[in-house]
Amino acid sequence: MKRKLAGRNEGVPSARSAAMLSEVFPTTAVDAGALGFVLSRLPRTSSAILWIQDRLSQKEAGRPYLPGLGAQRPILRVDVTRPVDVLWAMEDGLRCKGLCAVIGEIWGDPPALSFTATKRLALRAEAGQVPCWLIRRASSPDLSAARDRWRVASVPSAPHPDDAKAPGDPRWRVELFRSRQSRPGEWLARYDSASDRVHFTAPLRDGAVAEGDGTLGQRAAG
């Protein structure tokens, strides 16, 4: 099948997340790529990240291997049992302006994750000027006060510039399906580790991943 590039999308979102609540729905519930995408969009700072998981998220998706993240900032990990405890810890963390960001992982659609709960997180993030990301695994995109809502799927990494057999920069297929500040759209996102930037490329119409380095039609953000 002949591959065709989609037209260049306008309104590519900024690579660095603002101080607001954003939600991420991994296309495959246990895909760790959603976490990589979130980490790539955090502000450039040495401040700590508060990262909270509920019991089912940890059981089904696993705990993050912190040494393998290569993060230059401290990560404070909190494991809790119930989704309501994740929400409580996130809201409490958003009161601390010394944090770089607050990340929470919740499995499924628990009653505690209501519109009111997301509204509280959204208002707290904006009041405290701390970016807040909620990763919702095995969840449906029901009513929420999140300012940005994403679907994220891992795709093969970009070619390594020095070793054809080694993985290169990570890439994701991302869809911003709801936003209050950017135009919704779909992109192939690539994290450039050398420049610490995320690049968004118009995806291929047939759903395949571009050959080569994936930079055709590329627009840099961040």
Image (tube, rainbow, N blue to C red):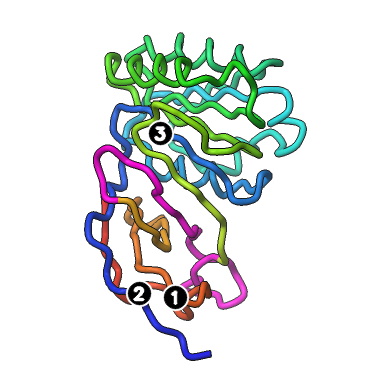
Residue under numbered circle 2: 6
In front: 58, or 100? Answer: 58
Tag 3: Cα neighbours inside 10 Å, few (<14), some, or many (≥20)? many
Identify the main secondary structure in magenta: loop
Contact, mark 2 vs mark 1 (Cβ under 8 Å): yes
Amino acid residing under circle 1: Arg
In front: 141, or 41? Answer: 141
Residue under numbered circle 3: 22
Tag 2: Cα neighbours inside 10 Å, few (<14), some, or many (≥20)? some
The residue that appears at 57% across and 34% down in the rendered structure is 136
Tag 3 or tag 2, which sits nearer the N-term?
Answer: 2
Specify start and end residues of the magenta stretch as a single range: 157-183
In front: 159, or 172? Answer: 172
In front: 12, or 47? Answer: 12
Image side of residue 153 versus residue 7, left or right: right
SS for callout 3: strand
Residue under numbered circle 1: 205
SS for callout 1: loop
Image side of residue 37 versus residue 66, left or right: left
Rendered view: 200 above or below 28: below
Tag 1 or tag 2, which sits nearer the N-term?
Answer: 2
Amino acid residing under circle 3: Ser
* Residues at marks 2 and 3, CA–CA distance in whole angstroms: 26 Å
Pinpoint residue 102: horizontal percent, then vertical percent. Answer: 45, 24
Image side of residue 98 versus residue 66, left or right: left
Image side of residue 89 versus residue 126, left or right: right
* Outermost residue, right side: 59
Residue 213 quadrant:
bottom left
SS for callout 2: loop
The residue that appears at 27% across and 50% down in the rendered structure is 183
* Outermost residue, front side: 143
